[in-house]
Amino acid sequence: MLWVVTGAIGSGKSDFAVELALSAGSEGIRLSCPPFPFPNSTDHSRAAKERDGKFLWTSSEADESLAHKLHAINMESNIFRAERRVIVVDSLSGWLRLMYNPKADRGTDMEKWVDARWRETLEAICSFEGKIIIVTEEPSAGLDMPPIERDFVYRLAAANRKLMASGATFYRMTAGMATEVKGYRLKRRDDEI
């Protein structure tokens, strides 16, 4: 089952994802990126919730190998344990932001490298057989964006549409309040990302 939590930066997406995980299972795996725009900040309220004695958390980084981690969790899962476990990816937008890191050595064709990781990760998310919560941002764009930012915004918007189509439930966060998004969805001719 796929749940998607989206919203603006600082809207409460991560806290809501933790609450959702606590209500959906009894143990969780958190695959996380540094929060944006303050990579060294810590959310103490979330850390306190994660130490709840009734819910067992395991944490790992959502790095370049995110797709491989999701496939490994899927393949190595004990069928009896998988029913009570929830995976939280916090956040897909943060992960994509890390893929565009200009300091990393991506070879000569960064766009192809990012595109390959992106497609592989979306496929791993959409084919995941257990309970998974994806936290992502709603992309916003200015009038005059550099090409790399424009690519990030379009790629994230396309992924959000794909997740909306694949997911069981889609939540939008506004000022700490979750709204379950439902309604008319446009049928797209080309669902390829």
Image (cartoon, rainbow, N blue to C red):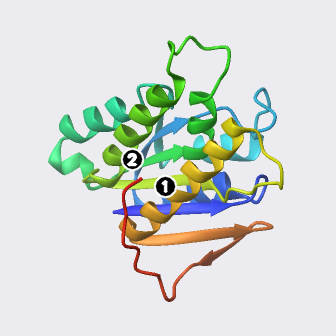
Q: How many marks?
A: 2
Which residue reaches farthest bottom?
184
* C-alpha distance separating marks 1 and 2: 7 Å
Compared with 171, 149 (above or below) is above
**Quadrant in the picture for the N terminus:** bottom left
Q: Quadrant of residue 102?
A: top right
Q: Residue at x 29, y 50 (%)?
A: 128
Crowd class of label 1 (few under 14; some 14 to 19; many from 20; radius 10 Å): many
The percent position of residue 47, horizontal first and vertical second, equals 67, 40
Q: Secondary structure at mark 2?
A: helix
Q: Residue 73: tell me if it is visible.
A: yes
| Residue matched to label 1 | 159
Q: Residue at x 40, y 66 (%)?
A: 167
Three-letter code, disc 1:
Ala
Q: Residue at x 40, y 80 (%)?
A: 187
Q: Quadrant of residue 8?
A: bottom right
Q: Residue at x 64, y 70 (%)?
A: 172
Compared with 6, 9 (above or below) is above
Horizontal relation, residue 168 to residue 137: left or right:
left
The percent position of residue 24, horizontal first and vertical second, equals 42, 62
Crowd class of label 2 (few under 14; some 14 to 19; many from 20; radius 10 Å): some
Work out whether residue 120 or residue 23 is closer to the camera in this orientation and state it. Answer: 120
| Residue matched to label 2 | 122
Three-letter code, disc 2:
Leu
Labels 1 and 2 touching (C-beta < 8 A): yes
The percent position of residue 92, horizontal first and vertical second, equals 54, 45
Q: Residue 91: tell me if it is visible.
A: no
Horizontal relation, residue 33 to residue 141: left or right:
left
Reading the chain from its start, which is encountered first: label 1 or label 2? 2
Q: Secondary structure at mark 1?
A: helix
